[in-house]
């Protein structure tokens, strides 16, 4: 019970992630098989659908856009600010901040992570580890999306007796970029909306909101 209480936020979101992923796979298989039947083509089992390019492409399209959103937001909030927003640092704190404020090297407390106390490449990696991890997941999922969508695209081309494309050709195609950009634009809109909404709107008890009585022009502290 203590573990669940201390980790309830991550357990909740990973839990509903698994539920919705399974739900997507079941609904996706049903939709895929309906389309197959409409074209007098063989249907597939759920297990086979899970490893299909149709399911993989749909999942990766969403994953890469989500991790791109977080990657850019993490990087942008180092340097860019928004007056009054709970998603922004104080206006005069733009940039990577001092070692003292970031509790690095000689300013690190006794219980700080080891790599916060060292210098050189290990320190640089740890200082940027969140951005590096998010960027790596974005690039991996973006590559996986391109491969699964490429496979799916060529399967459709063959089914219609049309020319297939190389992976490089597909990455430069309108089909690939239409799939990517339709996800990216929605993520950027959501982040921009959140930045602006936290200036004027509140949610009592949420760390994503300023205190209910805080003035609209009060920018959140970077902590």
Image (tube, helix red, strand yellow):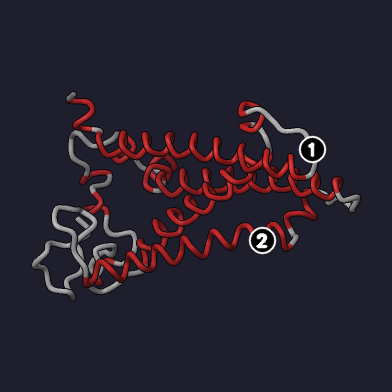
Residue 80 in picture, x, y percent from top left? 36, 69
Q: Which residue is mark 2?
A: 177
Tell me where residue 119 sits by quadrant: top left
Identified at 53% across, 50% down, the residue is 62
Q: Residues within 10 Å of mark 1 (few under 14, many from 20)?
A: few
**Residue 183 at what x, y percent from top left?**
54, 58
Residue 173 at what x, y percent from top left? 75, 60
Q: Position of residue 202 (x, y in %)?
A: 18, 64
> Which residue lies under the disc numbered 1?
41
Which label sits in the foreground, 2 or 1? 1
Q: Is residue 86 above or below residue 28?
A: below
Work out which quarter of the rendered image holds the C terminus and state it. Answer: bottom left
Q: Residue at x 74, y 41 (%)?
A: 36
Between 212 and 215, the residue placed more toward the observer is 212
Say which of 142 and 74 sits in front. 142
Q: Is residue 107 above or below residue 42?
A: below
């Amino acid at each position: 019970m203590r573990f669940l209480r201390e980790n309830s936020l991550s357990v909740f979101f990973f839990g509903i992630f698994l539920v919705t992923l399974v739900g997507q796979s079941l609904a996706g298989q049903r939709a895929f098989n309906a389309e197959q039947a409409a074209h007098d083509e063989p249907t597939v089992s759920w297990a086979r659908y899970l490893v299909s390019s149709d399911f993989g492409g749909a999942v990766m399209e969403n994953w890469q856009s989500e991790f791109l959103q977080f990657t850019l937001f993490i990087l942008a909030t180092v340097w860019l600010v928004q007056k009054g927003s709970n998603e922004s640092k104080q206006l005069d704190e733009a940039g990577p901040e001092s070692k003292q404020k970031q509790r690095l090297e000689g300013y690190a407390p006794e219980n700080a992570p080891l790599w916060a106390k060292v210098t050189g490449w290990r320190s640089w990696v740890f200082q940027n580890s969140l951005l590096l991890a998010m960027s790596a997941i974005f690039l991996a999922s973006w590559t996986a999306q391109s491969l699964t969508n490429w496979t799916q695209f060529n399967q459709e081309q063959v089914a219609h007796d049309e020319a297939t494309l190389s992976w490089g050709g597909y990455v430069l195609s309108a089909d690939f970029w239409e799939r990517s950009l339709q996800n990216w634009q929605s993520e950027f809109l959501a982040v921009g909306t959140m930045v602006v909404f936290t200036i004027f709107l509140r949610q009592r008890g949420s760390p994503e909101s300023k205190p209910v009585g805080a003035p609209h022009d009060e920018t959140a502290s970077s902590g």
